[in-house]
Image: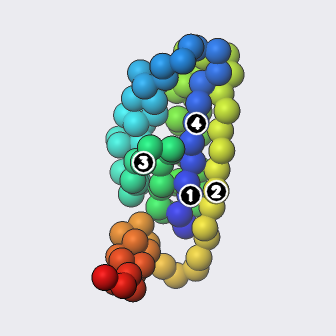
Amino acid sequence: MIAEFSIVPIGLGESLSAHVARAFEVIESSGVAFEHHAMGTNLEGDWDEVMDVIKACRDSLLETSGRVSLSIKIDDRKGTRNRLERKVESARRKMQH
């Protein structure tokens, strides 16, 4: 399964990078495959491990904020692994130059 998610603490001002860094620490220490991008993070793994990481990020941000906004998009496909890299590589191979 691949999950794309973004999490934003509410009511803490305009610059949120310090709070995002807290979520990054949770993600990077989880052992789950990930890719950070400008608008969120992609995680790849089984349902429970991915959702555990998202919950841990939520819990971490709620330590310093009374409210968070969380968006999750999931692509769940049986029997596949390493799709984070393979999906992008497949599309790039099909690009016309």
Q: Amino acid at mark 3?
A: His
- Of the residues tagged 4 and 3, which is closer to the observer? 3
Q: Do we see residue 16 in this rendering?
A: yes
Dot 1: few (<14), some (14–19), or many (≥20) neighbours within 10 Å? many
Name the colouring of the figure: rainbow
At 49% from the left and 23% from the top, the residue drawn is 16
Dot 2: few (<14), some (14–19), or many (≥20) neighbours within 10 Å? few
Q: Determine which of the numbered discs, if any, sits on residue 37 in the image.
A: 3
- Of the residues tagged 3 and 1, which is closer to the observer? 3
Q: Earlier in the sequence, mark 2 or mark 3?
A: 3
The reply to whether callout 2 and callout 1 are in contact (CB within 8 Å) is: yes
Q: Determine which of the numbered discs, if any, sits on residue 7 in the image.
A: 4
Q: Earlier in the sequence, mark 3 or mark 1?
A: 1
In percent of width and height, residue 67 lies at: 68, 22
At 40% from the left and 36% from the top, the residue drawn is 24
Pick the front one: 78 or 35: 35
Q: Amino acid at mark 2?
A: Lys
Q: Which residue is tagged 1?
A: 3
Q: Is residue 51 positioned above or below 23 on the image?
A: below
Q: Determine which of the numbered discs, if any, sits on residue 73 in the image.
A: 2
Q: Do we see residue 81 in this rendering?
A: no
Whether residue 93 sits left or right of residue 77 in the image: it is left
Q: Earlier in the sequence, mark 4 or mark 3?
A: 4
Dot 4: few (<14), some (14–19), or many (≥20) neighbours within 10 Å? many
